[in-house]
Amino acid sequence: MSRAGRPRSPARRVKWLTLAYLAAAFILLAEMVNLSWIRTGTYSAEAARQTGRVRSIPGERGAILDRRGRPLALSLMGFAVTSYQPELGDPEKEAELLAPLLGADPRELARKMRQGRYVYLARRLPPEVALQVDELARDGKLPGVELEPDPRRIYPAGATSLLGILDADGRGLEGLEYSLDAILAGEPGSVVLEEDVSGRLPLPGRPVGKPHRRGADVVLSLDEDFQATAEASLAEAVRRTGAKGGCVLVLHLEHGDVLAAASWPPPGSPGGVRPSQNYCFNRTYEPGSAMKVLTFAALFSSGVSPEARVEVPTALEVGGWTFRDAEPHPQEVKTVEDVVAESSNVGTILLSRRLGAERLLENMRRFGLGSPTGVGFPGEAAGILPAPGEISSSTWATLAIGQGVAVTPIQMVQAIGAVARGGSLVRPRLVLEVRRDGAREPAPLRPTLQVLDPAVASTLTRVLTTAVLKGTGKMAAIPGYQVAGKTGTARKPRPDGRGYGSGYYASFYGFAPATKPQLVVGVMLDEPTPIWGGEAAAPVFRDVMAFALGRLGIPPDLPIPEPSR
């Protein structure tokens, strides 16, 4: 019989059948593994799509705390009301029920419901309002209307001009909320809202994907009590003087901690400005006579003695410009110390002739003018110093008395602080530490820079105490304490840059106790009446500094006078 016609043996048939069964079993097992482990996420997502809807759960934003751990900004539970068009019943009827709870126009709500498949009707509702909406929904009166988590941000201590604002999606838009957004922002998660057999969404379902995560907390250098006092004192000064605005800064000298940074007007108030226009950090101005602190730092460094005498005429002409003192006087001889105390423009210019514009500019740069301090506030201004091509025959004279140069109050506080610290400049800071998942991450201390000889700083401090005791800064005096400081009164440049207008800036910068300085306070007012720094700004300095000294328990360095009987 031929090979083709020979029947196959039973053993061979069993062998092939066994191999076929094993192959089928292997394929089935592989598919089970694929479905159970490898593609489980894909099918779970598909199941969620078919039986429910995936909703994002926002990660809670971290809190902003003051140096004592008290909340300056924190997120509370809130809810959003949304509408899902495919499930809506009668939009007009539902809008009529919702409008009183949401404080909205029912016609506008109905329009929104028809506007898109899924829309927000209201956001950041407090729990008590959300509960009323939920009761209507559970009664079946709001088909297609749902509640979602939507945290709301509150600022218990105010200070929104510094802390900033969030956008509609809870991201930092301005101020510290913006600059710290990457640290504060939480990580969103998601959850499946399960549908019942009728297609309704009675209860939240299971979480899917990664869970939501809370953002880190940030501890600022601010002290809530200092900030509140600075804001209240500034508001009262604006009311008293009719100023357009201004700022108050309090700096602790040990590490450059900003204890308070008040800017007026705050966002949300009549005439309020955005945090990006903060007077302390973002706005520049001509400091006027407050700049004489740095001018005399350079003069004393060059060998000028406070006891030296200078003949001060009624007026002085430099480069076609005529300079006069605020108070008219005949030609007279003054000591250098008197020139500072009386804030004599003419005397200052005469003494500064030996320095020249380049040396004055170099000295200003050494004290940090012309560049941001790096304090950590977004959009901090660098200020303006004349470029080499802008130096004229009169530039040295204007620089000496704080004209033709633009600074920020935080730069001036930093510079005055360097004098108070014996010539050692410390950069100011706003952030002390970050707290994340129970761990603390302290901000590194900023390096200091010696910008003035300690002996010169001591001499300048003594002269600045004279300016408060018997000069233009008398209204800054605090009983029991030696105060060193300088007034500033400066005309405002015209908006078009052509000369000066009719408005003035008034300021006072000083430190105390002068024998062992610990605090610097800076005050600047925009167009106050009276215009003088000694009358408009110095009293604000006195009130804020007196509070700060008492709050920190800093002992007096002078005998406290007996109360008058």
Image (cartoon, rainbow, N blue to C red):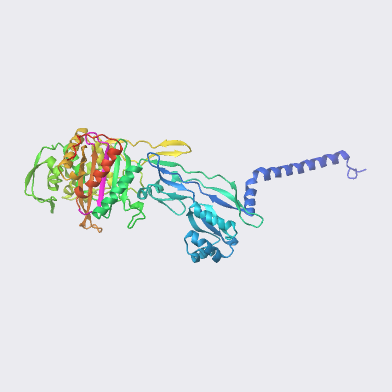
Q: How far from the left and from the top, in percent, is residue 280?
A: 30, 48
Q: How far from the left and from the top, in percent, is residue 522?
A: 26, 44
In the image, residue 309 lies in the stretch drawn in magenta: no
Number of numbered discs visible in the structure rendering: 0
As rendered, which of 564 and 473 lies closer to the eye?
A: 564
Query: Which residue ends up furthest to the right in the rendered image?
Result: 1
Query: Which residue ends up furthest to the front in the rendered image?
Result: 565
Q: How far from the left and from the top, in percent, is residue 563?
A: 19, 39
Q: Is residue 190 left or right of residue 379?
A: right
Figure check: 381 above or below 93:
above
Residue 503 visible in the picture: yes
Residue at image x 44%, y 49%? 153
As rendered, which of 387 and 420 lies closer to the eye?
A: 420
Q: Which residues are magenta?
A: 513-530
Q: Quadrant of the C terminus?
A: top left
Q: Quadrant of the N terminus?
A: top right
In the image, residue 521 lies in the stretch drawn in magenta: yes
Q: Is residue 36 left or right of residue 166?
A: right
Figure check: 344 above or below 116:
above
Residue at image x 51%, y 43%? 213
Residue at image x 59%, y 56%? 138
As rendered, which of 198 and 212 lies closer to the eye?
A: 198
Residue 381 visible in the picture: no
Q: Is residue 214 left or right of residue 488?
A: right
Q: How far from the left and from the top, in percent, is residue 326?
A: 14, 51
